[in-house]
Amino acid sequence: MSPANEPGPTTAAVQAVNLVKVYQTGGLPVHAVRGVDLRVDRGEFVAIMGPSGSGKSTLVHMLGGLDGRTSGEIWVDGKRADTLNESGWAILRRQKIGFVFQFFNLVANMTVADNVELPALLGGSTPRHARERREYLLGELGLADKADASPAQLSGGEQQRVALARALANQPQVLLADEPTGNLDSRNTRDVLRLLGEVHRQGQTIVMVTHDARVAGLADRLVTLLDGMIVDDGAIAPPRRRTKPGAGDVVELRG
Ligand SMILES: Nc1ncnc2c1ncn2[C@@H]1O[C@H](COP(=O)(O)OP(=O)(O)OP(=O)(O)O)[C@@H](O)[C@H]1O
């Protein structure tokens, strides 16, 4: 293990050490993640790419304790996390981790505003701070006028943006995002990317799975998975010409 990957009370927001996941399906093992070492420092924005089935979702689920590991270590904010039980993970998630996944799991009988404010309140924010944060996030995502709606009254793309606002409500130590723009049209994708860029500039650590090179181009660093292993890990060069992201944008690797 390289010194940069040594676990412990470091500056890492989240870290995997020799992380392995083997699913057992009908007696046949599926090696989804095969010994991944990944350290994400505070304030970094890491995009994870790779072909379908390469283990991207499994990796980020394990980093957030949503999927158990087969072996290896997970560290969150300098503390060992893989040894936690379910309730330990639940507390850690509430305090330190924000999630945006393809299934948004908004609470159906609560308004959009309450859905977004809840994690901040559970994390100890004052009601005023939770409301201000919610107003900021929904405003940035073009959803200010939906605050009093219920999730069922929203489109899929709107629900996805509410899920992002909820994940960021608590200013988590790390945001884990799995295809956060997966269901969005280009205008809504722009809103989401603008917000991710902005919270990143404010210091938010982000680990994001994406299939879209334009979305990955927003990150500082691109990690590529293949067959459950990291095959490339390098900094992303900023675009030479600062223009709006477009279909023809090329992501350059310095790695
Ligand atoms: N619950 C499960 N049970 C059994 N096998 C699984 C399970 N979840 C994922 N797998 C398998 O693990 C491997 C990695 O899957 P994973 O979803 O992590 O890939 P991915 O890179 O995120 O793919 P995609 O880009 O299609 O979302 C695949 O072979 C998949 O079939």
Image (spheres, rainbow, N blue to C red):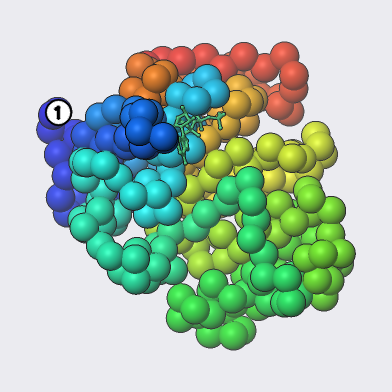
Which residue is at a point 76% across and 40% down the rendered structure image?
A: 184
Q: Examine the rendered structure and indicate whether residue 93 appears above or below residue 183.
A: below
Classify the position of the C terminus by image quarter. top left
Q: Position of residue 10 (x, y in %)?
A: 19, 49
Q: Position of residue 134 (x, y in %)?
A: 66, 70
Q: Is residue 46 visible?
A: no
**The quarter of the displayed image where residue 251 is located:** top right
* Callout 1 secondary element: loop
Q: Examine the rendered structure and indicate whether residue 174 appears above or below residue 244.
A: below
Q: Nearer the viewer, residue 239 or 81?
A: 81
Q: Position of residue 40 (x, y in %)?
A: 34, 41
Q: Nearer the viewer, residue 46 or 87?
A: 87
Which residue is at a point 74% across and 22% down the rendered structure image?
A: 246
Q: Examine the rendered structure and indicate whether residue 84 appears above or below residue 71.
A: below
Q: Amino acid at mark 1?
A: Ser
Q: Which residue is mark 1?
A: 2
Q: Position of residue 47 (x, y in %)?
A: 49, 32
Q: Describe residue 134's horizontal placement relative to residue 19 as left or right.
A: right
Q: Describe residue 51's horizontal placement relative to residue 116 as left or right.
A: left
Q: Describe residue 239's horizontal placement relative to residue 155 as left or right.
A: left
Which residue is at a point 64% across and 60% down the rendered structure image?
A: 105
Q: Nearer the viewer, residue 10 or 15?
A: 15
**The quarter of the displayed image where residue 70 is located:** top left
- Residue projecting furthest to the bottom: 127
